[in-house]
Amino acid sequence: MSDTGEFDISGKVCIITGGSGVLGSEMATAIGERGATVVLLARGEEKLEAASDSLEEQDIEHMTIPASVLDRAELEAAAETVVDEYGRIDVLINGAGGNHPDATTGEETSFFDLPKDGLEQVMNVNFVGTVLASQAFGEYMVEQGEGCILNISSMTAVTPLTKIPGYSGAKAAVSNFTEWLAVHMAQEYSPDIRVNAIAPGFFLTEQNRYLLINEDTGEYTDRGQSIIDHTPQNRFGDPEDLSTTVCWLLAPGSAFVTGTVIPVDGGFSAFSGV
């Protein structure tokens, strides 16, 4: 699949952190189908290999690099590898993130018993990892005078959800950082370096499935049903629901869009519950 004109992203070199995850893999496929080169960066080599096999089957030009978004040296080495191979970096999608049971309150764990390590892990992978990757790959965009950084925020950054204080706080930080970095890049370096974010609504992922689906029955948990009741489109999002918004934010058609956080949420943020 290819696009022309305002929606053309063919030939762009796009790095996706957390690229072997469910949402990262879907974004990689959508971007690759439109003619871009995809670089997947993640920690688990087994999942990276599986994601690579899928892209290979679709004849999508790609590269995989095992690295942690919390290791600046690994990120800088990855950036050098990409530039050596492809000559430039056009897009960074900061997709690495997720919640963790140790940062989640529940029947067995009260807020007062949440361990420091769990909270730090969630804050680090979502927020600190986004900052470090933006530093390592964003420097090349400054040299080029153009580029696009796309962060992944969340509906919980807008209205904090119960049970997940660490994740809610981390994603709120991502949204704030998106606005800050957009202004900083435009004013200090180039107005052609854009920074935006998407705020997905509720998608079933490996990190949150245990909160939304009862493993024994396959039915929604009370929490899952509550989310559905407050989502006007009456379903969880599918990974491909993000693709068109992502590709638009990377394309020339959104050239005057920067510093924004775009909801992709089935109407959740528009619904008061009444």
Image (spheres, rainbow, N blue to C red):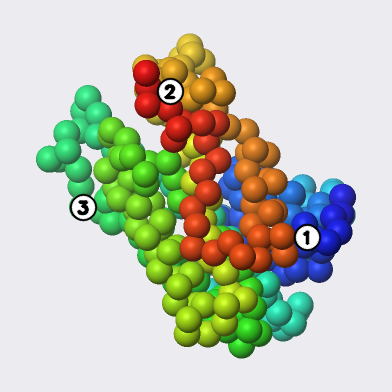
Tell me what residue is drawn at x 51 percent, y 23 percent. Answer: 232
The residue singled out by tag 2 in the image is 230
**Quadrant in the rendering for residue 179:** bottom left
Which quadrant of the figure contains the C terminus?
top left
The amino acid sitting under disc 3 is Lys
Q: Are marks 2 and 1 in contact (CB under 8 Å)?
A: no
Residue nearer the viewer, 274 or 130: 274
The residue singled out by tag 3 in the image is 116
The amino acid sitting under disc 2 is His
Tell me what residue is drawn at x 21 percent, y 52 percent. Answer: 116
Instruction: Name the N-terminal-most of marks 2 and 1.
Output: 1
User: Residue 47, how many percent across, how many down?
Assistant: 62, 50
The residue singled out by tag 1 in the image is 6
Which of label 3 and label 1 is nearer to you?
1
**Quadrant in the rendering for residue 5:** bottom right
The amino acid sitting under disc 1 is Glu
259 sits to left or right of 162: right
User: Residue 177, how many percent across, how many down?
Assistant: 40, 64
* 220 relative to 122, above or below: above
Instruction: Name the N-terminal-most of marks 3 and 1.
Output: 1
114 sits to left or right of 232: left
Residue 188 visible, this angle: yes
Q: Which mark is residue 81?
A: none
Which of label 3 and label 2 is nearer to you?
2
Q: CA distance from mark 3 to mark 2?
A: 32 Å
User: Residue 108, how many percent across, how many down?
Assistant: 21, 28
Q: Secondary structure at mark 1?
A: helix
222 sits to left or right of 73: left
